[in-house]
Image: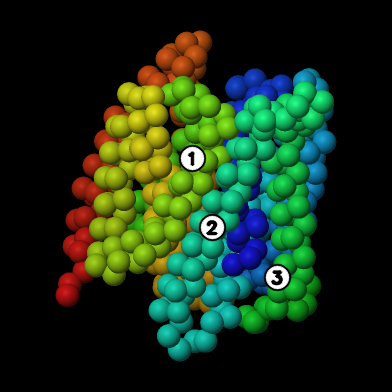
């Protein structure tokens, strides 16, 4: 739980898009960085999960934490308006970040799940997963608040005398410095992990075993209908919500939100996320995974429709709805995959999920950027028009998913 809080609750999230553009990158370069981040996860997600099952989950988590230290160190010292050097360093930062995410994805949940007693493990995991999500929500509450307040020092400078004013360029590094300290904490935590699940101790055949395990697990995920439905329904919602999450600071500027409030809004979302696990658990006990994801998709569609008008301040309501929906989807998908996965391939199954989700996210981000480009250089108007088109496209995709997937069985569990 400590690892997942320090690793995921990053103080620069509420200002992610403007962090890079204020450093001196163009919006087009920022979009390319997101593509590199998604590509890194796509390349390393499944191999890392298989290696976690073969080599050990602890080793992959230590590797992920070490990469987090390096990526944050690069971003902390990247030169402002550094031209090609700045772009190259940010590119390396995103590549290392994606690789770190791939290494941690699946291995963290797998090492925790297998440490639970075999008897009653599924029920115990529901409690652990809910508790971890609440701890993350608390972590996000603190990180988001600090990130927004540190990034925009105008509120603080208004109360300080002139000779004690905090320079803007310094303030914009402070959220990154805070996450660098979190990375060091993650490294210390992972070094103290203890492995409970058995794994291979000999180098010979490890790569071949990892490759064969990857193929078997991917084949199972894609050919087992219940798993495929959960993965498709999950990435359909997750790709749209995550793409918007990376651009949310631009949306805040579109609807006239001051910079210092970005973190406060993120904190309110974190408070809402505290209640998501309980809601998700009740919904998943009452409905099948298809039913739960169909409900989630309808909520997502409502949020997308309310985003498009870009109402000043009122636009925050659909933002919060979409951000909290990601936790609901994560709970639903994780719960089902842990239930069907064998212990020997648990991390690999979760990495297959991560691979599919990040591939969907990368492709959707590319499609959204092309939509923006198609509207020309219209600034906020182009962004708002793209949001309208997004809602229409998602409604068609959701309708097709529910129509096809529901033919295989009911969406509500029998009582």
Q: Is residue 172 above or below residue 299?
A: above
Horizontal relation, residue 248 to residue 29: left or right: left
Q: Is residue 73 above or below residue 250?
A: below
Whole-percent x and y of residue 61? 69, 64
- Looking at the picture, tell me which residue is in the foreground, 14 or 106: 14
Residue 293 visible in the shown view: yes
Check disc 2 and report its element: helix, strand or loop: helix
Query: Residue beneath label 1, please?
Result: 265
Please report whichever mark, 3 or 1, sits nearer to the chain's N-terminal start.
Answer: 3
Q: In what quadrant of the picture does the C terminus appear?
A: bottom left
Residue 208 visible in the shown view: no
3D distance between C-alphas at marks 3 and 2: 25 Å
Residues tagged 3 and 1 counted as in contact (Cβ below 8 A): no
Query: Could you say which disc has been placed on residue 168 in the image?
Result: none
Of badges 3 and 1, nearer the viewer stands 1
Residues tagged 1 and 2 counted as in contact (Cβ below 8 A): no
Q: In what quadrant of the picture does the N terminus appear?
A: bottom right
- Looking at the picture, tell me which residue is in the foreground, 41 or 307: 307
Whole-percent x and y of residue 380? 46, 17
Please report whichever mark, 3 or 2, sits nearer to the chain's N-terminal start.
Answer: 3
Residue drawn at (78%, 38%) of the image: 76
Q: Quadrant of residue 276?
A: bottom left
Query: Residue beneath label 2, please?
Result: 138
Query: Residue beneath label 3, please?
Result: 58
Circle 2 packing at 10 Å, graded few (<14), some (14-19), many (20+), is some
Whole-percent x and y of residue 408? 22, 60
Circle 1 packing at 10 Å, graded few (<14), some (14-19), many (20+), is many
């Amino acid at each position: 739980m400590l690892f997942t809080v320090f690793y995921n609750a990053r103080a620069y999230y509420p200002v992610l898009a403007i962090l890079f553009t204020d450093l001196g990158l163009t919006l087009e370069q920022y979009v390319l960085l997101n593509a590199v981040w998604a590509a890194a996860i796509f390349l390393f997600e499944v191999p890392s999960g298989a290696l976690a099952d073969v080599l050990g989950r602890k080793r992959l988590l230590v590797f992920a934490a070490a990469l987090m230290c390096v990526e944050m160190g690069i971003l902390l010292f990247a030169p402002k308006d550094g031209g090609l050097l700045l772009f190259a360093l940010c590119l390396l930062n995103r590549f290392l970040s994606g690789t770190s995410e791939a290494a941690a994805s699946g291995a963290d949940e797998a090492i925790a799940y297998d440490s639970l007693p075999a008897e009653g493990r599924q029920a115990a995991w529901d409690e652990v997963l809910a508790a971890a999500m609440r701890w993350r929500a608390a972590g996000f509450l603190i990180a988001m608040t600090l990130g927004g307040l540190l990034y925009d020092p105008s509120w603080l400078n208004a109360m300080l005398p002139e000779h004690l004013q905090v320079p803007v360029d310094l303030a914009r590094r402070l959220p990154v410095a805070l996450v660098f300290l979190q990375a060091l904490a993650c490294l210390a935590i992972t070094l103290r992990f203890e492995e409970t699940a058995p794994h291979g101790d000999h180098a010979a055949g490890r790569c071949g075993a990892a490759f064969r395990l990857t193929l078997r697990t991917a084949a199972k995920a894609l050919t087992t209908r219940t798993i495929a439905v959960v993965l498709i329904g999950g990435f359909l919602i997750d790709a749209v919500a995550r793409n918007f999450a990376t651009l949310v600071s631009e949306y805040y500027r579109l609807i006239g939100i001051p910079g210092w409030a970005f973190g406060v809004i993120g904190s309110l979302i974190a408070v809402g996320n505290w209640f998501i696990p309980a809601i998700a658990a009740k919904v998943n006990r009452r409905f099948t995974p298809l039913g739960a994801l169909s409900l989630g998709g309808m909520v997502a569609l409502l949020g997308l429709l309310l985003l498009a008008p870009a109402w000043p301040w009122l636009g925050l309501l659909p933002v919060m709805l979409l951000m909290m929906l990601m936790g609901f989807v994560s709970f639903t998908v994780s719960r089902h995959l842990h239930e069907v996965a064998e212990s020997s391939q648990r991390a690999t199954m979760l990495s297959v999920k991560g691979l599919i989700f990040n591939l969907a996210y990368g492709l959707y981000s590319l499609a959204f950027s092309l939509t923006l480009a198609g509207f020309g250089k219209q600034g906020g108007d182009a962004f708002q028009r793209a949001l309208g088109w997004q809602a229409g496209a998602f409604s068609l995709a959701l309708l097709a998913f529910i129509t096809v997937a529901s033919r295989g069985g009911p969406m509500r569990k029998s009582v």
